[in-house]
Amino acid sequence: MTDEHEGRRETPLAVKLKDRIRRTGPLTVTAYMQACLQDPEFGYYVKQQAIGREADFITAPEISQVFGELIGLWSAVVWHQMGTPSRVNLIELGPGRGTLMHDAVRASRKVAGFANALHVHLVELSEPLRKTQQATLAGCAVPVSSHADAVQLLSRRDLLGDAPVILIGNEFLDTFGVDQFQFCDGVWRARMVGLDRHGDLGFVAAGASAGPPGSVPATAIPREGDVFEEAAAGSAFATAIISALSQTQPFAALFIDYGHERSGFGDTLQAVEGHRSVSPFFAPGETDVTVQVDFAQFASAFRTSGGELLAVDGPVSQGEFLGRLGIVERASRLMSANPAKAAEIELSIARLMSPQGMGARFKAIGLRSAALPPLPGFD
């Protein structure tokens, strides 16, 4: 990605990061992303109300109520696969404004007994979003608890009891940092974030060879300048989350995110402001900094962490996943019940399903206790 100095904002976090680099040296890309998103003073997730048509980006649950409804019904089917336990913990990671969970709980009432068994847990770092979630889910008539850390929650038997867990993460995996490596002069070197000749934030190469990144496919032959992204933080999360989930039987998880199914070369680091892509150095702390999810790396990390206790379903495209859940049929019923909004509903479903857009660019991956059958949408 080309970094442009013109128009950059000297945000408080940019000043803080420049001072940090002058004192301790360049940052890994993972460290830079974590600071941009989670810095306790100026991090994007700590301070910003990021989601919505008037904000920086919009997620699938905000595009159509059908998305959240299908996730709710998906959860109810998984509950049946688990044997309809009298209590089940439905956990959402990064629930945004609470829209997905609101629609999911409403739809779940169509499945006898499921809503009565539910205890909803929302894992959210952003205090502004926590307040929005509380307002969105007020009156939903199921217990709702808020938490700041997923691994801590999953490790707390006093909070979850012996009840099984259904875990949902929509546009959550992309928040984990990646380490970047660049192939230069015949060797791999770590790509870092430092200060350029203008004294601005930018990419710099580490002097010493880093050796080949462990996740590079054996058949991939790098060319001069190629960049490879390794999801070190994501792999650590996978290990921690599976370790915590393994204390609960049965369990199931669903992650949907923007990314690719096979590992390959490319720089996917970007920032988003006002629904447009900008340089990751454009306004640190005031833009959403993300990467595409490498689902091959996550699937490998999940399998390695889960061993014989875990099965991995997918990944499959979002369009294929939602199609198998019956999105077209549900949308048709919704259009018949709301003829004045039929065109709007049709457009929103097309946006979720389009092979040229979210339908192909977003992928779904499922995790489950090995004893459970394949999860809905993957079989």
Image: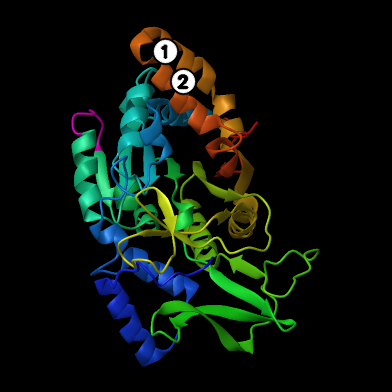
Which stretch appears magenta?
Answer: 138-143
Mark 2: give few (<14), some (14-19) or many (20+) Cα within 10 Å. Answer: some
Residue 226 inside the magenta-drawn segment: no
First-in-chain label (1 vs 2): 1
Image point (39%, 53%), residue name: 154
Residue 141 inside the magenta-drawn segment: yes
**Given the image, on which type of amino acid does mark 2 rest?**
Glu
Image point (48%, 55%), residue name: 174
Q: Which mark is residue 17?
A: none
How far is the residue under mark 1 from the one under mark 2? Answer: 8 Å
**Residue topped by disc 1:** 335
Depth order, front residue of 94/203 = 203
Q: Position of residue 349 (x, y in %)?
A: 48, 26
Q: Which mark is residue 346?
A: 2
Q: Is residue 136 left or right of residue 7?
A: left
Image point (48%, 70%), residue name: 3
Q: Is residue 239 left or right of residue 163?
A: right
Asked whether residue 134 is in view, the answer is: yes
